[in-house]
Image (cartoon, rainbow, N blue to C red):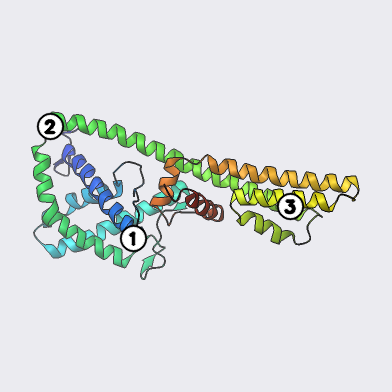
Amino acid sequence: MWSTQVWGMPFFELYAYFIIYSFLGWVLESIFVSVSLGKWVNRGFISGPLCPIYGTGAVLVILLLTPVQGKAIWLYIGGVLIATVVEYLIAVLLEKIFHATWWDYSQMRFNIKGRICLIRSLEWGALTVIMMRNIQPPIQRFVDWIPRTIGEFIGVVLLIYLIADASITIMNIFRLKEKMARLEETRLALREKIQTSKLFEAKKEVSDYLERLPITEALGKLKEKIEERRGQIANVRGDEQLRWDFFLSEMKEKLERRERILKKSSLTERRIMKAFPGLRFKKYNEEFAAFKKEFLEKYKKD
């Protein structure tokens, strides 16, 4: 497998370039985002220090643009085209698989569906010239220096790691999506209960109020309401008091269910939300936006 030729280049070399540039891309992305946000962010789709989109783009650039390595203008144009196509196709692929948008350039000029934009494409072109002229030659010498037996062993270990890391990440993303569905179900049940009750006059306002509150505060307010109402209805008929207590108990159970859902969040989910601030689920974006705000606020010191 390692000696298989791909467009005249051994697969081992291409795989080594993929790993190296995936790591360099992770370093670049993490530093850029961390400086922008003022705190460390582990950027990338998978949890480990690799950004496969950079590795994929770099391998394609090496395969397609090595023949014109001495011509900067063709390197630049080729880099713009290759990086733009790769970024667009990966954005579409992620959207189709997860029904979510991972990055969004819609606020930038000359963008296409928020997946790519002109300024980023031009930057990729400049980065391609720097890569092929200044970075690729020493990396190529380094890869040529690696003893093949050791390199193949490390390659197998890294491949197993990549598959495991990607599998765990994908599983957590689908679990996060399922969690958003449960949160939406809880929100709709809470709203429906209030809307069908005769105990509140301003039903929508009460529902919106409780839904917006962080769970601990919402439960605290609900308990205050219970105690307040019990004092007010001391002389009211028993069946009315029972209806009120039953209503508040159901509200409390729904809010506590929401709290249980939030508490089951994993480290991978937290990393994904920090690494991709533009992440949006198409069907559950309202729930995800509220969840992310509350969850990251809870763990802002982490």
Q: Where residue 210 appears, x then y in whole percent?
A: 66, 55
Q: Secondary structure at mark 3?
A: helix
| Numbered badge on residue 167 | none
Q: Secondary structure at mark 1?
A: helix
Q: Is residue 200 left or right of residue 187?
A: right
Q: Which residue is mark 2?
A: 148
Q: Where residue 179 appears, x then y in whole percent?
A: 55, 43
**Residue, far bottom:** 109
Q: Which residue is mark 1?
A: 36
Q: CA distance from mark 3 to mark 1?
A: 43 Å
Q: Residues within 10 Å of mark 1 (few under 14, many from 20)?
A: few
Q: Where residue 133 appears, x then y in whole percent?
A: 11, 56
Q: CA distance from mark 1 to mark 2?
A: 40 Å
Front one among 237 and 66: 237
Q: Is residue 236 left or right of residue 262?
A: right
Foreground disc of the pair 1, 2: 1
The answer to whether the residue labelled 1 contacts the one labelled 2, judged by CB atoms less than 8 Å apart, is: no
Q: Is residue 149 left or right of residue 296?
A: left
